């Protein structure tokens, strides 16, 4: 979980610094692509577990909990429901486990939609 968070932070920072993207693009496009890809990497690379439903859900929860903790201690915009939201984003991997690439696209779509909702003031 921590490695996915570190990779996400690194890639998001590099992409924003390299291309000078706006906050909107970072939040609605870059974050969903980078975070869902890093969280789903083991599944996309063929990792299997005896419980194919529980694994992605726990990965999402762990990622969200770590993200919340890091943002809370660094003064970022910590969102108390982050663990549950990131767990929700990983549900497509559990449901579409036979086709992880489609699950990845669906997870990115859910994440981008949520971030757009929050960014435009419709969320918390």
Image (cartoon, rainbow, N blue to C red):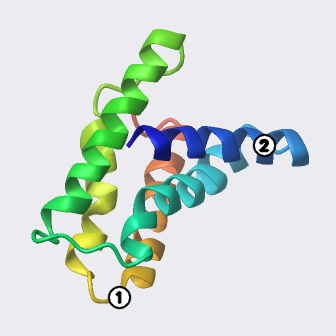
> Which residue is under mark 1?
99
> Which residue is under mark 2?
14
- Quadrant, the C terminus: top left
Q: Where is residue 45 in the image (x, y as percent from the top left)?
A: 44, 75
Picture residue at 58% right of the left edge, 45% below the top: 7
Q: Where is residue 56 in the image (x, y as percent from the top left)?
A: 26, 61
Q: Can the viewer see residue 124?
A: no
Picture residue at 42% right of the left edge, 83% below the top: 102
**Could you tell me which secondary element the residue under label 1 belongs to?**
loop
85, 120: nearer the viewer: 85
53, 23: nearer the viewer: 53
Q: Position of residue 122 (x, y in %)?
A: 44, 40
Does 15 appear above or below 68?
A: below
In space, the residues marked 2 and 1 are separated at their CA atoms by 30 Å
Q: For residue 54, which quarter of the picture? A: bottom left
Picture residue at 10% right of the left edge, 68% below the top: 51
Mark 1 residue crowding within 10 angstroms, few (<14) / some (14–19) / many (20+): few
Mark 2 residue crowding within 10 angstroms, few (<14) / some (14–19) / many (20+): few
- Quadrant, the N terminus: top left
Side of 27 where 88 appears, left or right:
left
Does 98 appear above or below 60?
A: below
Does 45 appear above or below 59?
A: below
**Could you tell me which secondary element the residue under label 2 belongs to?**
helix
């Amino acid at each position: 979980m921590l490695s996915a968070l570190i990779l996400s932070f690194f890639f998001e920072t590099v992409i924003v610094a390299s291309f000078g993207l706006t906050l909107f693009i970072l939040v609605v496009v870059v974050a969903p692509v980078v975070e869902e890809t890093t969280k789903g990497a083991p599944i996309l690379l063929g990792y299997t577990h005896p419980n194919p439903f529980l694994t992605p859900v726990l990965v999402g929860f762990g990622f969200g909990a770590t993200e919340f903790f890091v943002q809370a201690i660094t003064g970022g915009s910590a969102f108390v429901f982050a663990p549950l939201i990131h767990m929700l984003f990983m549900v497509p991997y559990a449901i579409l486990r036979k086709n992880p690439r489609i699950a990845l696209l669906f997870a990115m779509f859910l994440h981008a939609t949520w971030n757009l909702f929050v960014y435009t003031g419709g969320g918390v």
